[in-house]
Amino acid sequence: ACMLRHSFDTMQVLKVLFPHTKIAEWAGYHHENLTGTGYPFHLSANELDLGSRIVAVADIFQALVQKRPYREPLNLTEIKLIMDDMVTEGKLDEKVVTVLEQFHEECYYLAQSPVSID
């Protein structure tokens, strides 16, 4: 239940920090998908703008690149197969995934880079 709430909670916090912008919406919708089977709002393609679609693709890419407690990081070939399947299933925006694939090596490198908070 906590995992499923994080999108909604993120949206509520960002609405306060960035009022009158779409930042909260984009972050809050990052687990939605074009088929309406995402969460927490079960929005479909006509309800998800380009910003929301971009953040969803970026979030999935980032998650696949990073090491998780249950698996090692995936390589670019594995990531491409998974994301292409999600496009075929109608879950991800094909145009956004195509742009990501044009810059996949740079994005892969950035996603692997440690974050430094100074």
Image: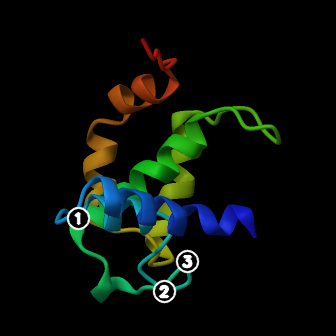
Q: Which mark is residue 5?
A: none
Viewer-nearest of discs 1 and 2: 1
Q: Amino acid at mark 2?
A: Gly
The front one of 110 and 2 is 2
The front one of 70 and 13 is 13
Sequence-first tag of 1 and 2: 1
Q: In terms of secondary structure, where does tag 1 sit?
A: loop
Q: List x then y, in percent, for residue 24.
A: 33, 62
Q: Residue furthest left?
A: 20
Q: Which residue is under mark 3?
A: 40
Q: List x then y, in percent, for residue 63.
A: 58, 44
For image coordinates 37% across by 57% down, the residue present is 14
For image coordinates 43% across by 58% down, the residue present is 13
Q: Which mark is residue 36?
A: 2
Viewer-nearest of discs 2 and 3: 3
In the picture, measured across the screen, residue 116 lies left or right of residue 17, that is: right
Q: Amino acid at mark 1?
A: Lys
Q: Amino acid at mark 3?
A: Pro
Q: In terms of secondary structure, where does tag 2 sit?
A: loop
Q: Quarter of the image containing the N terminus?
A: bottom right
Q: Pointer 1: residues within 10 angstroms few (<14), some, or many (20+)? A: some
For image coordinates 26% across by 41% down, the residue present is 102
Q: CA distance from mark 2 to mark 3?
A: 10 Å
Q: CA distance from mark 3 to mark 1?
A: 17 Å
In the picture, measured across the screen, residue 114 lies left or right of residue 3, that is: left
Q: Pointer 3: residues within 10 angstroms few (<14), some, or many (20+)? A: some
Depicted 34 relative to depicted 96: above or below: below
In the picture, measured across the screen, residue 103 lies left or right of residue 91, that is: left
Q: Which mark is residue 22?
A: 1
Q: In terms of secondary structure, where does tag 3 sit?
A: loop
Q: CA distance from mark 1 to mark 2?
A: 20 Å
